[in-house]
């Protein structure tokens, strides 16, 4: 049994990997920038193994499809259980303790999709009551602050981030898919790079205070407005993963969301995929 | 009538929204903004459980400085709006 520790957004978690005939750690390159020292103080410990999962007794509570990916959430007995499929094919099964501090993931042939999705879900659930949220967002840094772009899949978050990188000198990509936001003890709110960056490989162990959060929508003209609390709340809720039917999780995420809305500018940008959109956004949110 | 299961009242910087969080409301797909009076009535309706317009009229009249007629008008309007946006379930 090999153990390895990682730290993302200040939270340490551990993988326990069975010694097998494959060195799984070689495939986990995206986690390398996040390697951490061993500690007792983990948010979760995840055992990763490749034997076939036993899903007898699985009771499904919810199914979520996003393109070719499907997550089925439910339980086996008292234990939360998640089944991850790609194009209808089973890729992994995660079974956790009720407090989400320990989990077992059965990953067919140690496939990365199966591992990463299970880790992301467990991370989101284990940190939900620690003023932490896993976002679906593209993030750029500019002049020591970070700017987060939100929107449904396909609305152009990555495109807008790339426009910043191209036209806004000094901007850099922090993460292109799943950054982590955390409210710290001193009340400051930071966004962190993560091992999960989906489309554009961008695994950076960096963090920045959040300059602004921008909800994007495709439109024939570029316009930006500041969102009022209820609309800002709606924008955030849609962009944060979590099992909201678990009251502890829902309340935890709510605390994080309210903190963000109270301290961070949240805007809505109707935009074209052009240079003007990036400049308009930058002028309005940074300064 | 009862409030639709799985909906939760959340306060955001002094404003109130109804959000679907429970399994029964996962496909609710929208958020409803409530003013202060509506939010207050929502909390009362949650306490009562299976409530009627009369229940809420009595509560409003008892708590705020309004006439019983004004209370009835306000509550009826608010509850009708709740029904029209699908956040209240009528008795079968």
Image: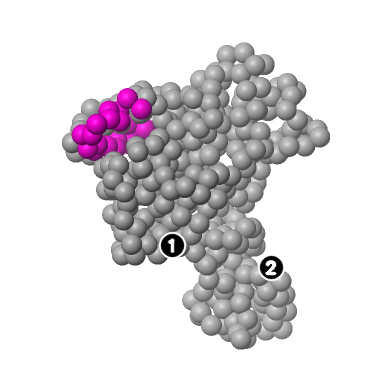
Judge left or right: residue A138 versus residue A56: right
Residues in magenta? A7-27
Q: Which residue in the structure is indicated by mark 1?
A: A60
Check residue B85 in the rendering and tell me which mark sits there, or answer none.
2
Label 1: few (<14), some (14–19) or many (≥20) C-alpha neighbours in 10 Å: some
Label 2 vs label 1, nearer the camera = 1
Q: In the rendered image, which quarter contains the C terminus of chain A?
A: top right
Residue at position x 54%, y 19% in the image = A172
Circles 2 and 1 on the same subunit:
no
In this view of the protein, can residue A44 be seen by the observer? Answer: no
Find residue A97 and report its horizontal and vertical position in percent: 28, 54
Disc 1 element: strand
Taking the magenta stretch, the answer to whether it contains residue A23 is yes
Q: Is residue A48 above or below residue A280?
A: below
**Foreground residue among B5 and B10:** B5
Question: Residue A112 appears in which quarter of the rendering?
Answer: top left
Taking the magenta stretch, the answer to whether it contains residue A48 is no
Q: In the rendered image, which quarter contains the N terminus of chain A?
A: top left
Q: Is residue A168 above or below residue B88?
A: above
Judge left or right: residue A129 versus residue A224: left
Separation of residues labelled 2 and 1 (CA atoms):
29 Å
């Amino acid at each position: 049994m090999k153990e390895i520790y990682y730290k993302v957004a200040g939270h340490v978690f551990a993988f326990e990997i069975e010694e097998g005939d494959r060195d799984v750690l070689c495939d986990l390159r995206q986690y390398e920038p996040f390697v951490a020292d061993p500690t007792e103080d983990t948010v979760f410990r995840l055992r990763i193994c490749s034997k076939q999962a036993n899903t007898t007794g699985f009771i499904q509570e919810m199914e979520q499809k996003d393109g070719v990916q499907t997550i089925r959430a439910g339980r086996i007995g008292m234990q939360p259980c998640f089944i991850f499929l790609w194009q209808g094919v089973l890729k992994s099964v995660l079974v956790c303790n009720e407090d989400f501090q320990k989990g077992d993931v059965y990953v067919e042939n140690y496939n990365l999709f199966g591992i990463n999705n299970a880790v992301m879900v467990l991370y989101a659930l284990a940190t939900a009551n620690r003023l932490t949220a896993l976002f679906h967002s593209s993030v750029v840094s500019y002049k020591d602050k970070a700017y987060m772009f939100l929107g449904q899949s396909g609305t152009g978050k990555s495109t807008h981030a790339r426009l910043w990188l191209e036209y806004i000198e000094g901007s850099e990509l922090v993460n292109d898919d799943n950054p982590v936001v955390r409210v710290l003890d001193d009340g400051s709110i930071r966004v962190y790079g993560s091992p999960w960056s989906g489309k554009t490989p961008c695994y950076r162990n960096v963090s920045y205070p959040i300059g602004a959060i921008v909800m994007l929508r495709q439109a024939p003209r570029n316009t930006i407005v500041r969102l009022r609390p209820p609309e800002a709340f709606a924008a955030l809720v849609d962009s944060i993963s979590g099992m909201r039917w678990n009251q502890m999780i829902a309340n935890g995420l709510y605390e994080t969301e309210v903190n963000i809305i109270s301290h961070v500018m949240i805007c809505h940008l109707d935009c074209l995929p052009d240079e003007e959109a990036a400049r308009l956004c930058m002028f309005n949110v940074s300064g | 009538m009862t409030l639709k299961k799985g909906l939760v009242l959340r306060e955001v910087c002094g404003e109130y929204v109804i959000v679907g969080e429970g399994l029964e409301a996962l496909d609710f797909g929208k958020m409803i903004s409530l003013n202060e009076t509506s939010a207050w009535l929502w909390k009362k309706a949650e306490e009562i459980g299976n409530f009627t317009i009369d229940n809420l009229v009595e509560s409003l009249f008892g708590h705020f400085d309004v006439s019983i007629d004004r209370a009835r008008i306000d509550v009826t309007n608010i509850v009708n709006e709740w029904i029209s946006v699908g956040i209240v379930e009528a008795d079968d």
